[in-house]
């Protein structure tokens, strides 16, 4: 290998590592920021304003980098569909549910997105068959979620619709991720992510206003701080890094964020909000994280075969 070829590969490896570090740490902390924000602001409007703030910043930065808007209507349609799945459905449902569910539990249930990604990866002509290790990991992981949700309901930590929303969120997020990878659009990832945020911000803000949430908004320091943190770091920086990684690494590698984010979220929830997990929930947590690791390992093993 020549030095000319080695340098770009080294630069790309460094970029991938930095992008993963951002996704791991920043997204792990967003569960805490969401929990703080929705204690002072209505969840749907809060999520909508988050993306309305982030979208213009991202679009301006992408344009400055030389990225341009897509030209084909098919690209605009795909951007809107992925936005509805990943951000309106995936992120929006998490934000709504955290009005009741502790941030550590929300992060752990959302960790199942890696399991759903593996499952959705089997669909279609380009799908991969699941081996016995992956199947075992999926079954065990969903059993862990059942334990976590069941114990949360038993202790009346949150109403059951909040847990239903949390169960649906990783499904929609995984579906959007797989769809985006299989049907790339004709513009750069940064611009694509920015446009998805714009679509999401409009949809969720209109929905929040229609639900009468404007009357419930309180401009507290905590709400403003959480909103800015989520808009700038959670959306612009971390989502931009994630969407770039979607087109740079395998789904198995991408799915690793699902068991690092919960660890960060649980630690921050304990340090800042004094959140605790019951003995049964600790057991369910361990099962979920183990299953995600097994599924990821099996995917890498299959890719190398």
Image (cartoon, helix red, strand yellow):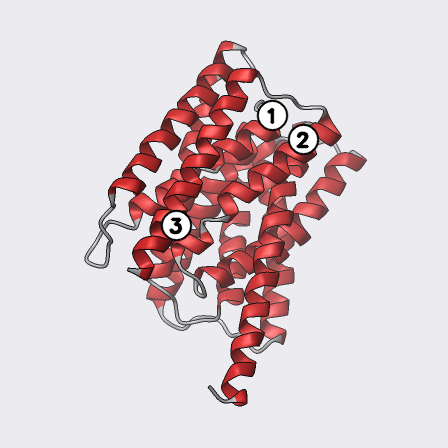
Of the image marks 2 and 3, the number of the one nearer the N terminus: 3
Kindly check if marks 2 and 3 are in contact, taking CB atoms under 8 A apart as contact: no
Question: Around disc 3, counting alpha carbons within 10 Å, would you say few (fewer than 14), some (14 to 19), or many (20 or more)?
Answer: many
Q: Can see residue 248?
A: yes
Residue tagged by mark 3?
176
Kindly check if marks 1 and 2 are in contact, taking CB atoms under 8 A apart as contact: yes
Side (left or right) of 159 relative to 214:
left
Q: Element under label 3?
A: helix
Residue tagged by mark 1?
102
CA distance for labels 2 and 3: 28 Å
Of badges 2 and 3, nearer the viewer stands 2
Q: Element under label 2?
A: helix
Residue at figure coordinates x 47%, y 22% from the top left: 148
CA distance for labels 1 and 2: 8 Å
Residue at figure coordinates x 70%, y 47% from the top left: 229
Quadrant location of the C terminus in the rendered image: bottom left
Residue tagged by mark 2?
269
Of badges 1 and 3, nearer the viewer stands 1
Of the image marks 1 and 2, the number of the one nearer the N terminus: 1
Give x and y (percent) for residue 157: 56, 16
Q: Which of 279/1 is in front? A: 1
Give x and y (percent) for residue 26: 64, 48
């Amino acid at each position: 290998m020549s030095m000319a070829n080695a340098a770009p590969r080294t630069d790309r490896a460094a970029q991938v590592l930095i992008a993963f570090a951002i996704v791991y740490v920043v997204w792990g902390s967003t569960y805490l920021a969401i929990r703080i924000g929705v204690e002072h602001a209505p969840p749907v409007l809060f999520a909508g304003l988050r993306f309305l703030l982030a979208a213009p910043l991202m679009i301006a930065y992408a344009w400055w980098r030389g990225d341009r808007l897509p030209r084909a209507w098919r690209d605009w349609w795909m951007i809107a569909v992925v936005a509805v799945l990943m951000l309106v459905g995936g992120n929006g449902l998490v934000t709504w549910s955290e009005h009741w569910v502790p941030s550590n539990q929300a992060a752990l249930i959302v960790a199942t997105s890696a399991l759903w990604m593996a499952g959705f990866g089997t669909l279609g002509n380009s799908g991969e068959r699941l081996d016995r290790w992956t199947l075992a990991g999926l079954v065990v992981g969903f059993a862990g979620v059942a334990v976590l949700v069941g114990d949360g309901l038993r202790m009346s930590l949150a109403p059951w619709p909040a847990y239903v929303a949390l169960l649906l969120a990783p499904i929609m997020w995984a579906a959007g991720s797989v769809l985006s990878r299989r049907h790339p659009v004709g513009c750069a990832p940064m611009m694509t992510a920015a446009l998805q945020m714009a679509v999401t911000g409009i949809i969720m803000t209109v929905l929040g206003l229609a639900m009468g949430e404007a009357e419930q908004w309180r401009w507290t320091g905590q709400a403003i701080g959480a909103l800015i943190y989520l808009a700038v770091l959670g959306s612009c920086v971390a989502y931009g890094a994630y969407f770039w990684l979607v087109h740079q690494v395998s789904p198995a590698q991408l799915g690793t964020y699902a068991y690092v984010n919960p660890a960060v979220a649980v630690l921050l929830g304990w340090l800042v909000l004094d959140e605790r997990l019951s003995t049964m929930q600790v057991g369910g947590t361990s099962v979920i994280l183990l299953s995600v690791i097994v599924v990821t390992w099996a995917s890498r093993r299959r890719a190398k075969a």
